[in-house]
Image: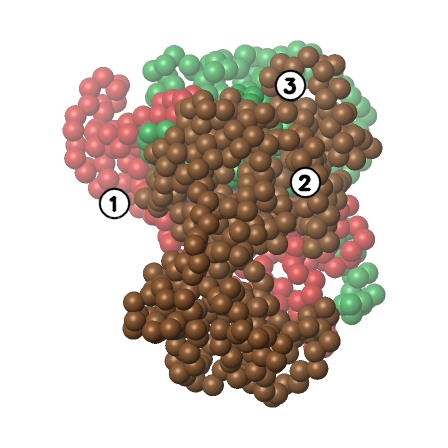
Chain colours: A green, B red, C brown
Amino acid sequence: MQYRRPGLDRLSHALLALCCLLFLLPVWLAFTASTHTLGALYSQTASLWFGEAGWDNYRHLLSGSFGGLGTDVLTLLINSTIMALGIAIGKIAISVLAAYAIVFFRFPFRRLCFWLIFITLMLPVEVRILPTFEVVADLGLLDSYAGLILPLIASATATFLMRQFFLTVPPELVEAARIDGAGPWRFLRDILLPLSKTNLAALFVIMFLYGWNQYLWPLLITNDADYLTIVVSLKRLLTSTDGLVPWQNVTTTAVLAMLPPVAVILLMQRYFVKGLVDSEK
Amino acid sequence: MAPQLGIVLVFFFWPALQAIEQAFYVEDAFGLSREFAGLANFEAVLSDATYYQALGTTLVFSLAVALGAMSIALLLAVMADRVIRGARVYRTLLVWPYAVAPAVAGVLWLFLFDPTLGLISSLLGNVGIDWDHKLNGAQALALVIMASVWKQMSYNFVFFLAALQALPKSLLEAAAIDRAGPWRRFWTIIFPLLSPTSFFLLVMNSVYAFFETFGTIDTVTSGGPGGATTTLVYKVYQDGFVGQDMGSSAAQSVLLMALVGGLTWFQFRYVERKVQY
Amino acid sequence: MATLRLNGIHKRYPNGITALHGIDLSVADGELIVVVGPSGCGKSTLLRTVAGLESISDGELMINEQRVNALEPAERDIAMVFQNYALYPHMSVFDNMAYALKNRGTPKDEIRRRVTDTARLLDLAELLDRRPRHLSGGQRQRVAMGRAIVREPQVFLFDEPLSNLDAKLRVQMRLEIRRLQKRLGITSVYVTHDQVEAMTLADRLVVMNGGHVEQCGTPMMLYAQPATRFVASFLGSPAMNFLPVTAHRDGVVLPNGVEVALPDMLSEGRAATLGIRPEHLVEATSMADAAAVLDVTVEMLEPLGADTLAYTRLPGLEEWLVVRLDGAHAAREGQRLSLAFAVAHCHVFDSQGARVPLAEPETQACQ
Ligand SMILES: Nc1ncnc2c1ncn2[C@@H]1O[C@H](COP(=O)(O)OP(=O)(O)OP(=O)(O)O)[C@@H](O)[C@H]1O
Ligand SMILES: [Mg+2]
């Protein structure tokens, strides 16, 4: 029933397409640069097309240590994957249990627990980075996967989302399950988790990205290259030499650092959008 | 329940309390002894000109990122919403920068603007603009802002598009019957109806600009040149981990916590109520 | 097969609300008891305490003369049908019906046999693989019934199971529930606020108000001899007419001075209420020994087909007097009518709302 305005529609399409291209530009340039040799890169301004090095940069970086990092990109990718999965799975497991307890059980100090957890919503890691670092150091968790993962699990976002979802489960469903003889664990396993499938998938995407893209925390607590993540390695690459920035290595690593999270978001876009938009409420 | 509480206590409350405690002590250079200093750390921070510079930078930076990312996203979302066919395709084409790490986004833009081989910096050179963010503080700030906007835009786009698609069609039809053109329809109906979403996004964008852009700043400028891109969060890191001044850094953390806590409280108490139509 | 007995059941919610003030009720084996009452009177609470979903604050709940106060819902061997059905949305119809049996460790082939038998009974055999959201309202209702039946429970509990259905389906399902309940002979408690449903389904009817049982007995007995003004007003549509009266030597007198001849039963001068059902007001010419004759003016007519409802006014009274006339009656608005009624159809309630017996009372306790 709205007035259709073909002119306006065409303009919209044109602008949208242009913006899509503009948004793609930095990535495209990085991608083409990653197929050039260092010499070719510095002989001209950045080329919009592929260079003669082909996959050589990738092969080289994935197979051996380079650029003063003391490790290869494959290790970095593995570390990032472990960290991202650890954070995503850990957060989800913990927040499902916490939200389950908060929503479905009455126990002493329930409100207090609720508030303790939800205050953490307010303050991201970045604010309390220094003291958290000391705690982790005191616990001897520097340069370890546990040190990378555990402090970041202590956020309340996922708990909050799960709680919001659990609150929408009709109480009669819980009662029907009780009458049908399902205890608390069985209810969680047979009814609640299957019902939350979409939400869990959405949460997984968001938390995986969150974990993969962490920067400050891993930067602080990893000295040992064996625990370095790929995102953090970029800064070291940029500053590793006093001379020219090794852009062919930097862009190659950047492309590799983008691939997994971008793949996740594109494959699971539906859940991601749902998870994001639902979290607003 | 218990595991979450444990983690929250160990990694959240313990650190927070330690920060508060530490803020009241000075340590010697080797961290061997420390003594109670009362409010001295806070006084030092609050009488330090660089702290106010960082505060100013944070405000400019946050405002620019939030407004930039939101207005572009709103424009694109409105267009994607009206083309009917293809809205989902455009969403796919625009959503992915969200998945790119802030540090990676920084690297991509750093490459575009590299003074020797960057594509855009050389284009700018052709029109007579000398680009060197390593020396020019304003250019450095602009570069960090662009990289941050680029990444954050997709987040806002997803929300605006969802909000637009959820608007009651009957309202727009009623407006069309009342002979309101697209422009009037947008400002008198759509925009006011989007205010809760916009407010929510304003909050989320500020949080993003405050904290998550750390990676962008660190890779692109490391807070320089001359502190031109040092935000409050970056300063906590710099003073504490690079400068090893734990007392000052802790005092800054506490101030930051208070600031964020106060803002959150303010949002919930005043602003959110007003935006509900 | 089971009996159910409630002895002085009290329910206080943690927030201080007392929803049940001592309910006594006993349900015989295979009996269908319907509990009716206005919204908030505690019907659901009563059902939920029986189910074990709410704890009992005081009193005793016996199933088969065994005290079950402390048992979990699943251990009480009851089944419940909820108003919104509460089907598990992610399970097929088959799995919904089988879930309780699985949880009890019933062998697989026995589960299959019982579910398919029940499905056949309820006309669900074609739908066993579907998810609840792909079913119509009536089909969902039947699945909810099936989930209860397949367990072969001691007691069935229904909480307004039909109120989410449209009027036509409701009538159809009402008949079906009645048929199934009789056929399976399972002791049942059925909660509704629809009085037609209540009257048609019940072996015995329990009328609740404010956490108390007002009266219980067969539907016809409650209709003919309501024990309180509340029960009288609650059952019957349109509701009973109530007129304020004062006790008199030979009966009662209306505010406009009309005397109604009734057996002596109240001390003179006391205020009371006289109740007459719309269908018991007839034209004076067709009645010989009327208790009184009322001259009224018709103000409004509502033709229903078989009957016509006349809303009339008695000079000197504020209340409407509703009369059920024959559908063929040629009444017009503004017309004057002379209405009469028999002593046998008079209900008198004292100022507390309790029935004042005119003849020897037949009483029937809930126990
Ligand atoms: N969980 C609860 N906590 C506190 N009070 C409750 C709770 N459930 C019900 N009540 C109160 O108990 C009283 C009886 O409620 P109940 O749900 O049993 O009424 P009902 O007769 O089923 O009404 P309806 O016809 O509306 O379903 C009401 O005053 C209600 O507010
Ligand atoms: Mg109820």
Seen as rendered, the residue at the extreme front is C288
Which comes before the other along the chain, label 3 or label 2?
3
Q: Which mark is residue B47?
A: 1
Q: Circles 2 and 1: CB distance less than 8 Å?
A: no
C248 vs C222, nearest the viewer:
C248
Q: Comparing marks 3 and 1, which lies closer to the viewer?
A: 3
Mark 3 lies on a secondary structure that is helix
**In which quadrant of the rendered image does the N terminus of chain C lie?**
top right
Q: Chain of mark 2?
A: C
Query: Which residue corresponds to mark 2?
Result: C177
Pinpoint residue B84: horizontal percent, then vertical percent.
Answer: 78, 56
Pinpoint residue C50: horizontal percent, then vertical percent.
Answer: 47, 33
Pinpoint residue B40: horizontal percent, then vertical percent.
Answer: 19, 37
Q: Circles 3 and 2: CB distance less than 8 Å?
A: no
**In which quadrant of the rendered image does the C terminus of chain C lie?**
top left
Residue shown at 37% from the left, 37% from the top: C8
Is residue A277 rendered to the left or right of residue C131?
A: left
Is residue C20 rendered to the left or right of residue A4?
A: left
Mark 2 lies on a secondary structure that is helix
